[in-house]
Amino acid sequence: MRSRLAGFLILSLGIAPALAAPTADAAAAMRVEGFLGQLTSLRAEFRQTVTDARGRVLERAEGTMALARPGRFRWDYRVPEQLIVSDGVTVWLYDVELEQVTVRAAGEALAGTPAMLLAGEGDLSNEFEITDAGQQDGLDWSRLTPRRPDGDFRELRLGFAGRELRRMTFFDRLGQTTELELLQVERNPRFDSSLFKFVPPPGVDVVGRVPLS
């Protein structure tokens, strides 16, 4: 009787037991879902570094990126000069030095990849397990592990400053690590649809076939 009375008094006075704080993993998932849930488009400068399993630098690159969800994105690499464009149906990879364009269906190219995550394709919880990766370099990190065993990478880490994404780190299955730093980030800008269209320049080799829309 006393326990029932105490419970009645707590509810009558508007006093509720303190709710448990979210676990670290739950907070990590909330960071990712909160960022992506309100994202319609993104524009930023980027710096990219690729290292091997021993930490040796294999490649450095920089450029600009733009994406418009769902499915459209454009990565302009200044050094080395490359362009990756998706209109949501087709992904084009243009290597200026090699004078070659590689064409793939967007669904096939993006399945289970970090690009799919940003592009807004697929279901986040179905594709990735999200856990906490602690704090480093002043950022809060969330770890995403792909549920598909046949993907090209084994882990993705996203570094947030508050609600904003600032760093991305990919660990592939060959032991290489790709670090991507985002600078001058502009959230939800407007883009002309022509930005995400691509026509191969005359004379370049085209590898692959444009998928039917």
Image (cartoon, grey):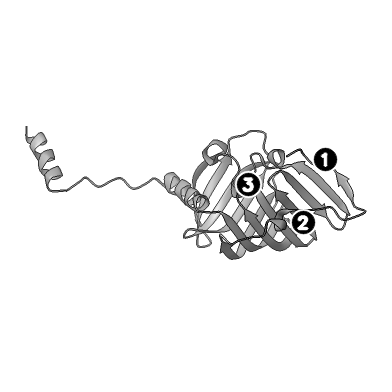
Cα separation, mark 2 vs mark 3, equals 17 Å
Amino acid found under the numbered disc labelled 1: Arg
Write down the residue under mark 3.
114
* Badge 3: residue crowd in 10 Å (few <14, some 14–19, many ≥20): many
Mark 1 and mark 2 in contact (Cβ < 8 Å)? no
**Image vertical order of residue 62 relative to residue 101, above or below:** below
Q: Is residue 13 left or right of residue 125?
A: left
Task: Identify the disc placed on residue 83.
Answer: 2
Q: Quadrant of the N terminus?
A: top left
Residue at 73 percent across and 60 percent down: it is 76
Quadrant housing residue 48 = bottom right
Quadrant housing residue 60 = bottom right
Residue at 71 percent across and 38 percent down: it is 108
Can residue 5 be seen here? The reply is: yes
Q: Position of residue 67 (x, y in %)?
A: 64, 55
Q: Secondary structure at mark 1?
A: loop
Amino acid found under the numbered disc labelled 2: Leu
Q: Position of residue 190 (x, y in %)?
A: 60, 61
Cα separation, mark 3 vs mark 1, equals 23 Å
Mark 3 and mark 2 in contact (Cβ < 8 Å)? no
Of 200 and 23, nearer the camera is 200
Amino acid found under the numbered disc labelled 3: Pro
* Badge 2: residue crowd in 10 Å (few <14, some 14–19, many ≥20): some
Can residue 52 be seen here? The reply is: no
Which mark is in front, 2 or 3?
2
Q: Is residue 195 left or right of residue 15?
A: right
Q: Work out whether mark 3 precedes mark 1 in sequence or the reverse, and give the earlier one.
A: 3
Task: Identify the disc placed on residue 154.
Answer: none
Q: Quadrant of the C terminus?
A: top right
Quadrant housing residue 40 = bottom right
Task: Identify the disc placed on residue 209.
Answer: 1
Q: Work out whether mark 2 precedes mark 1 in sequence or the reverse, and give the earlier one.
A: 2
